[in-house]
Amino acid sequence: MAAQGDLPDVRLDPAGLYREEIFTDRRAGTIRRLTPVTVEGGVDNTRPVLFSGQTQLLTPAGVLPLVFEIEARTLEEALKKFPEGVKVALEQAIDEARELRREAASRIVVPDVGAGNIGPGPGPAAGGGKIKFP
């Protein structure tokens, strides 16, 4: 068990408080509106209202959650920009998947050239293949 001094000091920032509201059509996704508030709970008009969208797409590999920011001032504007946000988030997810696939492919290590057979007789050494993993 961690000593009392090793535990992180987790505190909320009183100057960064938001009230969260979620709007959904129960079909395509949700829009989250974050309204800045003061410590007393009143609306803080000195900071902008923030919007984000969330949806899920069914893929052959399973459900793909998409979460994205929406640049909007009103809920109506956020609703209009929701489809474009989904497209951008999906394109980013596809690009990230391609990059992960490239990284995984580059991890294959080629066997040492000139390494002779070890063990009796012709053919590969005991233990089979020559693929090495890092």
Image (cartoon, helix red, strand yellow):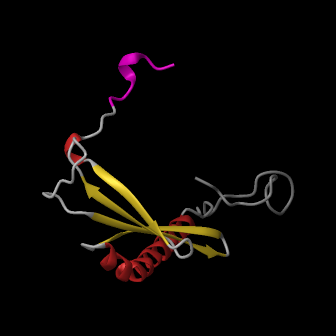
Q: Position of residue 21 (x, y in %)?
A: 38, 59
Up-down relation of residue 87 to residue 103 (above or below)? below
Depth order, front residue of 5/72: 72
The answer to which quarter of the image holds residue 7 is: top left
Which of these two is toward me, 130 or 41?
A: 41
Q: Residue at x 43, y 82 (%)?
A: 83
Is residue 24 found inside the magenta-colored segment of the image? no
* 127 sits to left or right of 50: right
Residue drawn at (25%, 45%) of the image: 41
Secondary structure predominantly adopted by residues drawn in magenta? loop
**Residue positioned 33% across, 78% down in the render:** 76
Q: Is residue 81 above or below residue 12?
A: below
> Compared with residue 129, is residue 13 higher up or lower down, i.e. above or below?
above
Q: Position of residue 49 (x, y in %)?
A: 25, 63
Instruction: Give the magenta range.
Output: 1-9
Magenta run includes residue 5: yes
* On screen, residue 15 above or below 92: above
Q: Taking 129 as reference, is 41 left or right?
A: left
| Quarter assignment of residue 72 | bottom left
